[in-house]
Image: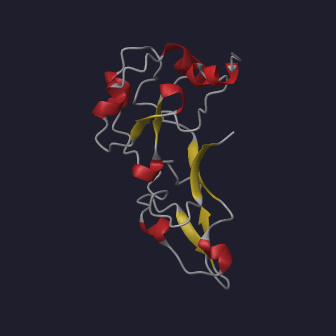
Amino acid sequence: MHFDDTKRSLFKRKKEITTDNLLPWIIDAQQFLEKCTQCADCISVCPENIIIKGDGGFPNIDFDLGECVFCGKCADVCKEPIFTATSASPWQKKALIKQTCLAHENIYCRSCAESCEAQALTFQLGISAIPIIDTDLCIGCGACVAPCPTKAIEIKELK
């Protein structure tokens, strides 16, 4: 009988864990991965229900489910030393618009701007109005992500 060891990888932890949408106020992604117990307390306490079990079972924010209101409950409920004080800035993430935006196809759509409470989105005039994000006003809450019909907006850490 031949033993197929490739199937064992289903039960092994991936070498690389995606850390794109970790929770706000995380001190350091590596420290988070080392010390998070995956207890899911942060998931159950989130009033917006946007925290899910993500890559490797670690909590992640799914902006397709809604926006983060930065209530701080996820950081407050955590028993591990992986969060900064919630009085500090939650993160340096901002919204980024990809080429799949309908405006690049000359289709009128302003769903992103209509959902942005911070009014960080404006439109460049032309044949079609191309959305422009004011990174000084954008807080990276993700309110613009879910309403986008082409999933052309993502929240990313500024480097």
Q: Is residue 139 visible?
A: yes
Image check: 42 left or right of 153? left
Image x and y of residue 121, in percent: 54, 64
Q: How many marks?
A: 0
Colouring convention used in this rendered image of the protein: secondary structure
Image check: 69 left or right of 13? left
Q: With respect to residue 43, does 30 lie above or below?
A: above
Tell me which corner region of the image, top left, top right, bottom left or bottom right, holds residue 73: top left
Out of 22 and 26, give the one closest to the viewer. Answer: 22
Image x and y of residue 157, in percent: 61, 41
Q: With respect to residue 106, does 77 lie above or below?
A: above
Q: Is residue 24 visible?
A: no
Task: Quadrant for the N terminus, please.
Answer: top right
Q: With respect to residue 143, does 26 lie above or below?
A: above
Out of 4 and 123, give the one closest to the viewer. Answer: 4
At a point 60% along the width and 19% down the height, the residue shown is 12
At a point 48% along the width and 27% down the height, the residue shown is 58
Tell me which corner region of the image, top left, top right, bottom left or bottom right, holds residue 93: top right
Out of 153 and 83, give the one closest to the viewer. Answer: 153
Image x and y of residue 102, in percent: 60, 73
